[in-house]
Image (cartoon, rainbow, N blue to C red):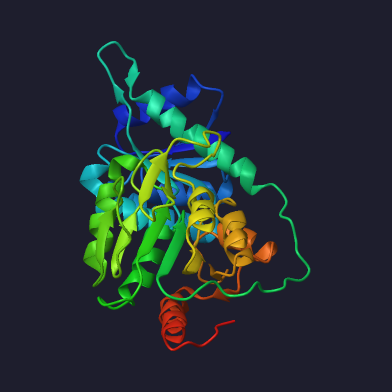
Amino acid sequence: MRVAIVNDSPMALEGVRRVISMSQHQVAWLARDGAEAVWRAQSDTPDLILMDLIMPVMDGVEATRKIMQQSPCAILVVTATVSGNASKVFQAMGFGALDAVNTPVLGLDGQAQGCDELLAKIGTIEKLLRQTNKPGHHVASYAMAPPAASGRGLVAIGASSGGPQALSTVLSKLPADFSSPVVIVQHVDPNFSQELARWLDSQCALDVRLAKEGDELLAGRVLVAGSGDHLILTASHRLSYTPHPREMPYRPSVDVFFDSVVQHWNHSVVGVLLTGMGRDGAQGLLQLRDKGGHTIAQDEATSTVYGMPKAAAQIGAAVEILPLNDIAPALLNFYTNQKNGCRVS
């Protein structure tokens, strides 16, 4: 891949450049602030930009926003301390950055420490880009399956690039006494998934927590996947983590969680697929619809990256395709109708 590097620190810039130069990837260009990166990306859009956050002239958050609007490409946040800049990381991801990692540090021997983690992130994004370019399977028509049994409800949400802000928008519109548990699988590094849960908790009236092994699903509680393994629902209706399947380009995988819901949840369910690059979650959403679940995909106009919801729309997985601001009202409407014994189609 052609990789661009944006960082105002000469030492950090050189450290990252060395890591890329020693890999199979090619350095496309270097930029020392966000404004320069925006200009360079317009004239020479790379496959991937490694974006610092704290820079003069224009920071990485604003640069990410402008690049995704004007010359979109994959962006990985590479900053001195991911945990120390959590709020800015989530802002950048809200504008379309895919992930974040700490900047490799040049040691006294001239070697970059932390290069393995950076290269692993780049390798994951490379797999994701290949997956994104695969053609989708189109379905001409779709017959709605019978609705699942009413009673205990579940909202299962998947998201990737652009997800943190989209999740905040949805959750902030749900009341504290929302009648169903919510489980979120967001493509995010496990090192700052705890920060994501805390940030989302501060954005809404619901109780947002990191999903732990054995967690029970409770009404009004939001559980966020927080491991390098896949989050799944077990037959006892509790949450667990599994390393399988290992070949998934993203961990945790939305498809893996949706599939576990299909296998083990026998009550009403709403599956939601939000903005994100790639196709993760599309097949799982289709399985949920096949079982009779109500399924929602975010529309193109409000998606930061119209990849995952587009893939779902292409295969007929979504009962509804909605603007972001309409998704929470749709969830409220669905469970109000369920409570009143009305069929929703």
Toward the right, the furthest residue is: 140
In front of the other: 22 or 29: 22
Give x and y (percent) for residue 293.
55, 69
Q: Residue at position x 32%, y 57% from top?
A: 223
In front of the other: 276 or 69: 276
Asked whether residue 39 is in view, the answer is: yes
Q: In this view, does 49 lie to the left or right of 82?
A: right
In front of the other: 229 or 240: 240
Give x and y (percent) for residue 279.
59, 52
Tag count in the figure? 0
Toward the top, the furthest residue is: 109
Q: Quadrant of the N terminus?
A: top right
In the image, residue 294 above or below residue 102: below
Q: In this view, does 120 lie to the left or right of 287?
A: left
Q: Residue at position x 25%, y 75% from top?
A: 176
In the image, residue 143 above or below residue 55: below
Q: Quadrant of the C terminus?
A: bottom right
Q: Residue at position x 31%, y 51% from top?
A: 211
Asked whether residue 77 is in view, the answer is: no
In the image, residue 97 above or below residue 111: below
Give x and y (percent) for residue 161.
46, 54
Q: Residue at position x 36%, y 53% from top?
A: 238
Q: Is residue 151 left or right of residue 313?
A: left
